[in-house]
Image (cartoon, helix red, strand yellow):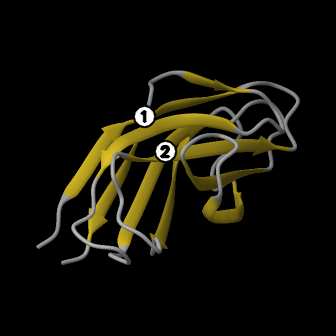
Amino acid sequence: MGASYFVNAAPDTTLTNAVETVVATLTGVLSQRGGQKVELEGQVNVTAGATTTAFVLRIREDSLTGNLVDEIATDTLATAVGSAEDHVIHAEHTPTGELSNKTYVLTVTQTGGSGAGTVNHGFLRADLTP
């Protein structure tokens, strides 16, 4: 079994409409060799702002402006605006070299809304394959 890394999302993070926001930052990921696959999972529990139609979840390398690892293009609301609901993203990243203190971030963008949403809680996890 490979190493695992985990971080909770910052609670009560405000989501401004159409602005990509970092909600979890996972640091210190180390690999044992170049090309070792990293399996990533992020989850957020969000309350949508007024008139919100969907959320976009992304996992990026390093920071908000880092390379995109993967995204869920449009994860539409399952419940009414103002209700809390969960959204999940899974991704695989196979770096070309060895990782040393690598950082991944989980971001959320609220779309179609006229009011701010909230990330209530969540997490970002990385598992290195053996």
Tell me the residue at 11%/73% (across/down).
1
Whether residue 63 is situated above or below residue 16 in the rendered picture:
below
Say which element carries label 1.
loop
Specify the quadrant of the image occupied by residue 65. top right
Evaluate if marks 2 and 1 touch, with contact meaning CB atoms under 8 Å apart: yes
Using the rendered image of the protein, determine whether residue 83 is visible from the camera's viewpoint.
Answer: no
Q: Which residue is mark 1?
A: 9
Relative side of 88 to 52, left or right: left
Specify the quadrant of the image occupied by residue 2. bottom left
Crowding at dot 2, Cα within 10 Å, few <14 / some 14-19 / many 20+, comes out as many
Q: Tell me where residue 11 appears, x and y as whole percent.
A: 45, 24
Looking at numbered disc 2 in the image, what kind of residue is underneath it?
Val
Q: Tell me where residue 94 appears, x and y as whole percent.
A: 45, 75
- Quadrant placement of the C terminus: bottom left
Tell me the residue at 54%/45% (across/down).
62
Say which element carries label 2.
strand
Specify the quadrant of the image occupied by residue 126. bottom left
Whether residue 70 is situated above or below residue 120 in the rendered picture:
below
In the image shown, does 102 or 92 lie closer to the viewer? 102
Looking at numbered disc 1 in the image, what kind of residue is underneath it?
Ala
Considering every residue shown, the one lying at the far left of the view is 1
**Mark on residue 37?**
none
**Mark on residue 44?**
2
Tell me the residue at 25%/76% (across/down).
129
In terms of sequence position, does the residue under pointer 2 or pointer 1 come before the other?
1
